[in-house]
Structure formats: C-alpha cells, structure tokens
Image (spheres, helix red, strand yellow):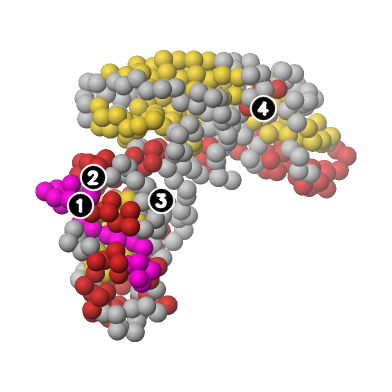
C-alpha cells in the first residue's frame, strides 16, 4: 500500500517490517538513539521515506536531518504556541531549501492562521486528524494536504472503511495524500489492506487538473444530435474537433455521414476510417480556418466555453454545442490558490469538490456565436459565511441543442492574494474576455471588499489546461 504511513518508534520497526509502507514517522530521539538499528537505513526504510517528528525545542533535528539526508519534518500544531511554531518552521525552511514541513492539525482555523504567519509557503502542508463526524471534515479539502491521520472513526468493527467515508478517502487519494496510522492501533496490517482495496483503482491527479473525460459529452447524446442533423439534411458535411476523434468519427460514419472533415494534423484516425469504409465516405484533414463543413462538432474546449481558434469558424452554419452558459461564484480554496502560478494569471480546470462556496453562483456569460469575442461583466455577491476568499469558481455548461445542458466543466480563477470576508460582506468581481481577432485572453480583478490590480493585464494567451 504505497499511499500509507506508520507513525511509529524505532522499537516498532522489526515488529511491522512485514507490511512496511512508503513512509514512517519517527521522533528525533528515536532516530538519534536507533542509528545502530540495521533496518533503519536499508532499502526497507530509506532516509527519503523517513519523516522526523519534532517540536519547538528540537533545533538539533535540522542538523540530524541534513546529515542523514532526511528532508521531511512533522510537527503537532498547538494553538497556545502557534507563533513559536511558525517561527520554528520558518527557521527550518531557511536552513535548507530541500526541507519540507508537515503540520498535524485538528482545527481548521489554526491551520489557516499558521499558514498566514508563514506567508502561505508551499513547502508547508497540512496533516489533518480526521474527526468523527464526516461533515466536520470537508473544510480540509480546501487546504494543501499531504498526509492525513486516520482514526478508529473511519473504520467499522470489522476493520473495513465505513461506507460514508469511502468517497471522502478516495478523493484524498486522488490528491496524492498519504494516510497515516498510529503504530499502537490494533490490526494495522488489516487496516492497511482494507484501505488499499478502496483506492487501488484510483489514479492520482495534478492539483489543478480535472479528469478530461468529465468535460466530454455522452456519446449517446452526440449520436442523437447527429441523427437529427442527417434527418434535416442527409448530405450534410461534418467537421469534428474532438478529444475522442476516432470514436466520434466512427460513430458519425456509421450513422450515415458521407463527408467528414477531421480537424487534426494526425492522419492515424484518417487512415483507420479509410480502412473501414473505403470509398464509401469522403474523409479529409482540415484546420478550423479553412473548414467549410456544414456543421462543426467541438469538444476541445478550453474549459471556459471556447478555445482561441473558434474565431476562425466564419464559414460554418451550425456549431455543436449550440450554446455555452458560464456561471461564477466566490470560493475558498487555499489548495487551488497555492498551486496557481506565482502571478495568479492562469485559469485551470479543476475538481469542484476541493473548494467551498462563499456565495450563490450567478450568470457570468452566455455565448451562442463564435463572434461573441469581446465580453465583460461585473458581478456582485454577498458572502453567506465567514471565510477566506481565494478566487472564483466557474461552471461552464455546454448545450448540445437549444434546451439540453449535457456537460459541465469547472474552472478556478485565482485572485492576487487571499482576502478575509465575513457573513454579509459585499464581494465584487470584474471579468473580461478580449480578442485581437486571432486569439482570446482574459483579464479580471477583485473590486470589493478590496480593490486589487487587474490580473493578466498584459494579455497573456490563455491555454487549454486539461491532462489528456
């Protein structure tokens, strides 16, 4: 089980070597006193997988870590000495650029305060202790978590993960979180195996990337639209620009399209279709600028409704999707904010589960024509919680026909710095989409409760940011 960790002592190593996970957390004193233990620095437990458990009085742990090549440190966050802990952590990070700090915390507000004192340093991550009530733990999704301490509350009497916790734990695994077990827990080996059984098929993703297939329209809906087009005009020519190029092209040909334009420079799909259908259909490669297809199917969206080359679609009489609706709301997500670019000028496709809404969503744009290039909007919100504003979440709905919304995509738009808001605080946000006739770019800024400078003011080109 690679995504697990034992919080142990050197005396536990021999006992637990048969199911040793990737990481082990050991105290400074344990490491110092156990240097003679032959298991400690062999392949089963190499220095890169050891985390030193320290406290504010363990200044020597930095020297020991540097000497042994151990770069990860963990500390328990205690509210009454929070400032001292922040100073201690910053001292460690200044001692070596390779050092990373993991902070064990059971109170969300204490973590946010510590993170603020440490200037949101990306080398400091949170290790929450999951509490009994699952609803009290969703706040942790919005912060940068590296390790998570599992307790008896996540398991039933048979050592299986409680049903209500399964999705929660799977989502943490998607974020590359390491699950921590205390060495004194009963049946640790069984607990590890049962954890592995629910996450083994889950792939981990980059923080700012949503699964590509989650922004694609269902194939059966696409086929229904294709049949409707053919019923209206049997000899319609169809252009296809898709992440599922082969699948969509094959479906279109099987349904009866005899003239296909593939918006691609790769002839692999072209050759496959020719091998299947021969001279029964006309197939060619084109770019959007030169395409004269009667109808264009698009699913290569930038996640914000359209991609730059759509401006070239001046000859096409029909575009699928026919309409794009974009809603926006302010959110708290230190997690997404910290992993945005340093100048906060990027917009990324994300999983909405890892952000918390601060107000109800409102309409930002509705787009139905390619030439709707230049748009601007000023949106006003009222915060309905006490929170920290890190940016805005957009939900883009793609309408295959006039009435049916069949696909959603979520984006995170960061602001320059986090802003504290209270219940009832007015929040105002200005967003612009501009075009020079060839490319799109986006500009935005917060105007309330603080006036922040315009972001992306130089018009950096927006890029498609989905992992394929």
The answer to whether marks 2 and 4 mark residues whose Cβ atoms lie closer than 8 Å is: no
Residue 246 inside the magenta-drawn segment? no
The answer to whether marks 2 and 1 mark residues whose Cβ atoms lie closer than 8 Å is: yes
Q: Quadrant of the N terminus?
A: bottom left
Q: CA distance from mark 2 to mark 1?
A: 8 Å
Q: CA distance from mark 4 to mark 3?
A: 32 Å
**Residue 228 horizontal/vertical position (percent):** 67, 25
Residue to which mark 3 is pinned? 175
Residue 71 inside the magenta-drawn segment? yes
Residue 200: numbered disc: none
Seen at 65% across and 37% down, the residue is: 242
**Residue 413 horizontal/vertical position (percent):** 43, 30
Residue 39 against residue 23 in the figure, above or below: below
Q: CA distance from mark 4 to mark 1?
A: 51 Å
Disc on the earlier residue, 3 or 1: 1
**Residue 464 horizontal/vertical position (percent):** 58, 36
Disc on the earlier residue, 4 or 1: 1
Work out whether residue 45 can be spotted: yes
Disc on the earlier residue, 2 or 1: 1
Residue to which mark 4 is pinned? 309
Residue 278 against residue 444 in the figure, above or below: below
Disc on the earlier residue, 2 or 3: 2
Seen at 26% across and 29% down, the residue is: 420
Badge 2 density bin: few <14, some 14–19, many ≥20, Cα 10 Å: many
Q: CA distance from mark 2 to mark 3?
A: 22 Å
Camera-side residue of 385 and 67: 67
Q: CA distance from mark 2 to mark 4?
A: 45 Å
Camera-side residue of 65 and 361: 65
């Amino acid at each position: 089980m690679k995504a697990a960790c034992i919080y142990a002592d050197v005396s536990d190593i021999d006992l637990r070597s048969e199911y040793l996970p990737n990481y082990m957390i050991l105290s400074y004193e344990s490491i110092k006193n156990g240097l003679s233990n032959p298991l400690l620095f062999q392949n089963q437990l190499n220095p890169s997988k050891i985390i030193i458990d320290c406290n504010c009085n363990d200044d020597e742990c930095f020297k020991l870590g540097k000497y042994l090549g151990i770069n990860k440190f963990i500390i328990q966050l205690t509210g009454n000495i929070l400032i001292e802990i922040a100073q201690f952590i910053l001292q460690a990070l200044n001692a070596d650029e390779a050092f990373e700090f993991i902070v064990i915390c059971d109170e969300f507000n204490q973590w946010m305060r510590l993170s603020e004192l440490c200037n949101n340093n990306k080398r400091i991550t949170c290790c929450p202790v999951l509490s009994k009530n699952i609803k009290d733990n969703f706040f942790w999704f919005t912060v940068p978590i590296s390790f998570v301490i599992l307790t008896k509350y996540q398991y039933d009497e048979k050592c299986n993960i409680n049903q209500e916790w399964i999705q929660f734990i799977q989502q943490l695994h998607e974020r590359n979180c390491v699950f921590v077990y205390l060495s004194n827990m009963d049946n640790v080996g069984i607990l590890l195996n049962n954890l592995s059984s629910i996450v083994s098929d889950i792939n981990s993703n980059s923080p700012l990337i949503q699964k590509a297939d989650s922004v694609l329209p269902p194939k059966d809906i696409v086929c229904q639209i294709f049949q409707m087009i053919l019923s209206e005009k049997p000899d319609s020519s169809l252009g296809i620009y898709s992440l599922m190029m082969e699948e969509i092209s094959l479906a279109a040909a099987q349904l009866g399209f005899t003239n296909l334009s593939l918006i691609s420079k790769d002839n692999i799909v072209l050759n496959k279709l020719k091998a299947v259908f021969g001279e029964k259909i006309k197939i060619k490669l084109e770019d959007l600028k030169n395409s004269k297809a009667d109808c264009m199917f698009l699913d290569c969206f930038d996640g914000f409704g359209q991609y730059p080359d759509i401006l070239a679609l001046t000859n096409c009489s029909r575009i699928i999707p026919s309409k794009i609706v974009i809603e926006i709301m302010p959110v708290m997500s230190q997690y997404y904010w910290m992993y945005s670019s340093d100048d906060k000028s990027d917009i990324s496709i994300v999983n909405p589960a890892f952000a918390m809404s601060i107000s109800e969503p409102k309409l930002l744009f509705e787009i139905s024509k390619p030439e709707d290039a230049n748009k601007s909007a000023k949106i006003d919100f009222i915060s309905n919680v006490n929170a920290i504003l890190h940016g805005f979440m957009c939900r883009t709905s793609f309408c295959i026909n006039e009435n049916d919304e069949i696909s959603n995509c979520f984006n995170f738009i960061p602001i320059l710095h986090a802003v504290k808001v209270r219940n009832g605080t007015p929040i105002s946000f200005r967003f612009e989409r501009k075009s020079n006739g060839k490319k799109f770019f986006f500009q935005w800024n917060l105007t309330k409760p603080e006036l922040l400078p315009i972001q992306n003011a130089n018009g950096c080109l927006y890029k498609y940011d989905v992992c394929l």
